[in-house]
DNA sequence: GTTGTTAAAATGTCTGACATTTAATAAGCT
DNA sequence: AGCTTATTAAATGTCAGACATTTTAACAAC
């Protein structure tokens, strides 16, 4: 694959990294392929070699590519990607063409992990956590069904789940909240939104909120499962 | 804190990054402190500014520091660290002075997550996974109690748990196997190893192996809990 | 045909100069 | 005095060019 199909580029090395990363994430290159060389990239986007090297350094850190002196740059396979790197989440957000295998993997992870996360949150949530959770829920409720507020609704949805991860007050679990945004956006892009399913989804979210508020770990576990079951239906993963 | 207390440095930017990272991980600087400036670091370790910048770029990517033009380099707090970055795991392995709060956080994560991981492994493990798991267990058994084979024993222990993460065949869970090495090494350094506890630990590991082999998800869940309970005792977290 | 040498091509490194951003300082006005 | 505005200093960011190193491939010699 060549560079010609990629969109134009205005701005620094970060922007270039994002551009190239998103191309990799959507499968513009196959694992094992040789990636374009520094000078070609620099020529194509009219940027200095420095910028290219900085961008490629980010991609390397994220496990997307592998560089060796003399040989060149190779594209790594999906299993090597550092999915939990915050940069990856940033690059993935808003990608409609995200590999379905990846979307399913992230969902499978959430499905297995979030009941436990909800349990921990029910044990450890502070008053402040509850307040944030309620605010996020209220935001979801108000923006539900309004086509003009879809972006807002997504953000409140992400915030709701992220607060739960944060409420575990565990340094490791907290890192994983990053996966939520790309995952939830992928969901929204792939599912239809009639009033009935939205209302059902809201109800299930409220059950999670109530359980965490009550400190009922078993109820939180179950309620989180119900939310994800709803999600699975919407995604067509059954 | 100054650079003077740090060990000497031979080799490339990666080595320098590791050196500085380990200093940060063991609390040589407090969050919010200003980190030494590029030129000072370069002068102190007799390396080019390039090497310093590359090293600091790694630390930035890992969330350990934060750099802004004009202001300088600031040390970030533990909550901002990217604990799931593979580089972090590499930097943490073998650190005896690792912050106890961090060790406890990682352990608490494992305690909440690994039963679920074991469940998934019991569902998804292939014949090859089982073979690897048995090999790791056999390695643990043979090297148990032999003071000359302590390093080996650690590696087999890490491998045992890592295989379980791998056996979930989930791209996200697989990433988290990286946390095991630093976590297990921290455990070994902090606990005493009489024959009795070692034997008990081995037995509990075998129960996990058997449950996964049998595809019994509930047994795997319980057995994983038992292994971690043993670990908790050894760590003094009760 | 195998082996050793050479040449090309890619990434990695060094250096010095310059740009940009930020914070502190000093000047100048009301 | 107090506030605003230039100036300066110091740090990181960027650039350009030369050079080093590593790998692959071509080619020659035996």
Image (cartoon, coloured by chain):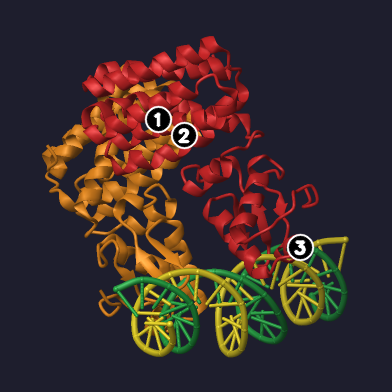
Chain colours: A orange, B red, C green, D yellow
The reply to whether residue A156 is visible in this rendering is no
The reply to whether residue A196 is visible in this rendering is yes
> Few, some or many C-alpha atoms within 10 Å of disc 1 (few <14, some 14-19, many ≥20)?
many
Residue at image mark 2? B180
- Relative side of A121 to A25, left or right: right
Chain ID at mark 3? B
Residue B115 horizontal/vertical position (percent): 35, 23
- Relative side of B41 to B140, left or right: right
> Few, some or many C-alpha atoms within 10 Å of disc 2 (few <14, some 14-19, many ≥20)?
many
Q: Residue at x 36, y 66 (%)?
A: A74
Chain ID at mark 2? B
Residue A92 horizontal/vertical position (percent): 33, 56
Q: Earlier in the sequence, mark 2 or mark 3?
A: 3
Q: Is residue B169 above or below residue B220?
A: below
- Residue B161 has which mark? 1
Q: Are marks 2 and 1 in contact (CB under 8 Å)?
A: yes
Residue at image mark 3? B40
The part of the image, by quadrant, that contains residue A95 is bottom left
Q: Earlier in the sequence, mark 2 or mark 1?
A: 1
Chain ID at mark 1? B
Dots 2 and 1 on the same chain = yes
């Amino acid at each position: 694959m060549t560079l010609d199909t990629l969109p134009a580029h205005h701005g620094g090395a970060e922007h270039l990294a994002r551009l190239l990363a998103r191309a990799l994430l959507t499968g513009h290159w196959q694992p094992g392929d040789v990636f374009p060389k520094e000078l070609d990239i620099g020529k194509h986007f009219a940027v200095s070699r420095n910028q290219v090297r900085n961008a490629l350094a980010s991609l390397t850190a994220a496990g997307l590519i592998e560089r060796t002196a003399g040989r060149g740059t190779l594209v790594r396979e999906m299993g090597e990607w550092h999915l939990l790197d915050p940069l990856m989440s940033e690059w993935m957000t808003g990608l409609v063409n995200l590999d379905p295998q990846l979307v399913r993997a992230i969902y499978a992870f959430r499905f297995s992990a979030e009941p436990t996360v909800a349990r921990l949150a029910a044990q450890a949530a502070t008053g402040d956590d509850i307040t944030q959770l309620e605010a996020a829920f209220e935001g979801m409720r108000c923006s539900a069904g309004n086509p003009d507020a879809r972006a807002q609704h997504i953000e409140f949805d992400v915030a709701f789940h992220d607060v739960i991860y944060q409420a575990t007050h565990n340094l490791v679990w907290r890192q994983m909240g990053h996966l939520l945004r790309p995952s939830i956006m992928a969901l929204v892009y792939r599912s239809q939104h009639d009033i009935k399913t939205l209302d059902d989804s809201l109800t299930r979210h409220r059950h999670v909120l109530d359980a965490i508020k009550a400190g009922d770990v078993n109820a939180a576990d179950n309620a989180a499962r119900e939310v994800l079951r709803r999600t699975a239906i919407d995604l067509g993963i059954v």
